[in-house]
Image (cartoon, rainbow, N blue to C red):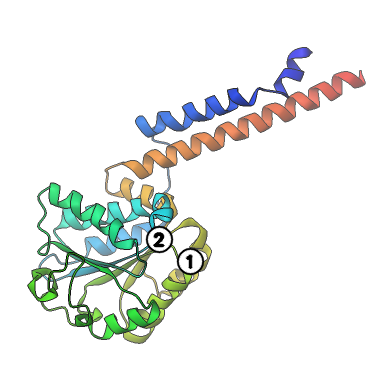
């Protein structure tokens, strides 16, 4: 029964190598592990499908930094892809200092694909003040006089007719902070009746779900899985689906090793009793 003892003492290097392979393969060739589409994700998709490209401009708030990007940036990418596919214009802003960099990654890609900055989309940059900044922008969006590149807001066609937050067709908040998500809801949804959906990092999902059930948020993307579900709704599986495949494969391997180790231990113990 020496092999049973070996199963309980597998060289960690073997485990790490297997994990590396199982995480790498899905990122290169997605496995397509099935995902159920949650009603929260479908609501966001349906809302964007219902917007009017001729009149609606969407405000996107990128309230996250690179540290949270692996969990939430794929949401922003796939939502912007949906807006672009439907020809809906959008304006991005951020309440965290490095948020504009996340917006710029998306706008640079859109420009490379033929989009026109200032006409189809714009980056208003970082606005300090947290909840006070939200309140000020909500009541008078012209408190922002220049965009992230230093251009006057008056020179951006996408901002024509936008004087306060109610002039946007919808607000989408990508949040890594429960406090700032609450602030957006307090200052815009509760006080001004603005229509809002949100995408959040996994760790604050429990804080965000009550707002969805109360109707204050009309849709909710939950972590990386929310982005993967959205990609499936778009019929364009991408990085989020691949990352979910890798995550699932890694979890299955860990569970397999736990089961193997415990089974070997129980068999060894039974044999020793005999």
Residue positioned 67% across, 23% down in the render? 10
Chain-order first, disc 2 or disc 1 = 2
Residue 164, x across and y down, in percent: 22, 82
* Label 2 close to label 1 by CB (< 8 Å): yes
Q: Which mark is residue 143?
A: none
x then y, percent, for residue 177:
45, 66
Quarter of the rendering containing residue 154: bottom left
Q: If the image is split into quadrants, where does the N terminus sit?
A: top right
Q: Is 251 located above or below residue 221 in the figure?
A: above
How many discs mark residues in the rendered view? Answer: 2
Identified at 38% across, 34% down, the residue is 27
Q: In which quarter of the image is residue 236?
A: top left
Query: Where is the C terminus found, in terms of image quarters?
Result: top right
Q: Is mark 1 on a helix, strand or loop?
A: helix
Left or right of 147? Residue 157 is left
Residue found at x 68% / y 26%: 260
Q: Is residue 29 visible?
A: no
Q: Name the residue under label 2.
A: 40
Q: How crowded is mark 1: few (under 14 residues within 10 Å), some or many (20 or more)?
A: some
- Residue 10's place in the image compared with 181, above or below, is above
- Under tag 2, what secondary structure? helix
Q: Residue 127's spot in the image, x, y percent?
A: 31, 73
Distance of label 2 from label 1 (alpha carbons):
9 Å
Residue 209 numbered mark, or none: 1
Q: Check the image and name the residue furthest to the right.
A: 273
Point 40% across, 75% down: residue: 216
Q: Callout 2: few (<14), some (14-19), or many (20+) C-alpha neighbours within 10 Å? A: many
């Amino acid at each position: 029964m020496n092999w049973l003892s070996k199963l309980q003492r597998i060289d960690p290097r073997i485990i790490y190598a297997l994990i590396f392979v199982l995480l790498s393969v899905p990122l290169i060739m997605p496995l397509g592990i099935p995902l159920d589409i949650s009603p929260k994700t479908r609501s966001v998709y349906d809302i964007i499908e219902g917007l009017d490209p001729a009149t609606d401009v969407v405000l996107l708030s990128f309230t996250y930094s690179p540290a949270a990007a692996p969990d939430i940036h794929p949401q922003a990418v796939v939502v912007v892809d949906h807006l672009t596919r439907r020809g809906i214009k959008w304006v991005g802003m951020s309440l965290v200092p490095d948020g504009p960099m996340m917006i710029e990654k998306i706008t640079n890609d859109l420009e490379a694909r033929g989009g026109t900055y200032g006409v189809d989309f714009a980056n208003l940059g970082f606005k300090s003040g947290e909840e006070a900044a939200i309140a000020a922008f909500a009541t008078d969006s012209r408190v922002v006089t220049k965009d992230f590149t230093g251009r006057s807001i008056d020179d951006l066609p996408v901002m024509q007719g936008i004087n306060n937050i109610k002039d946007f067709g919808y607000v989408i908040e990508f949040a890594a902070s429960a406090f700032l998500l609450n602030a957006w809801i307090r200052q815009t949804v509760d006080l001004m009746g603005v229509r809002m959906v949100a995408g959040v990092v996994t760790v604050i999902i429990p804080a965000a779900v009550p707002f969805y059930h109360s109707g204050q948020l009309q849709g909710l993307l939950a972590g990386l899985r929310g982005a993967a579900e959205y990609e499936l709704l778009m019929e364009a599986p991408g990085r989020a689906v691949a990352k979910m495949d890798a995550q699932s494969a890694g979890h299955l391997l860990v569970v397999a090793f736990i089961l193997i180790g415990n089974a070997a231990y129980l068999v060894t113990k039974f044999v020793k009793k005999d």
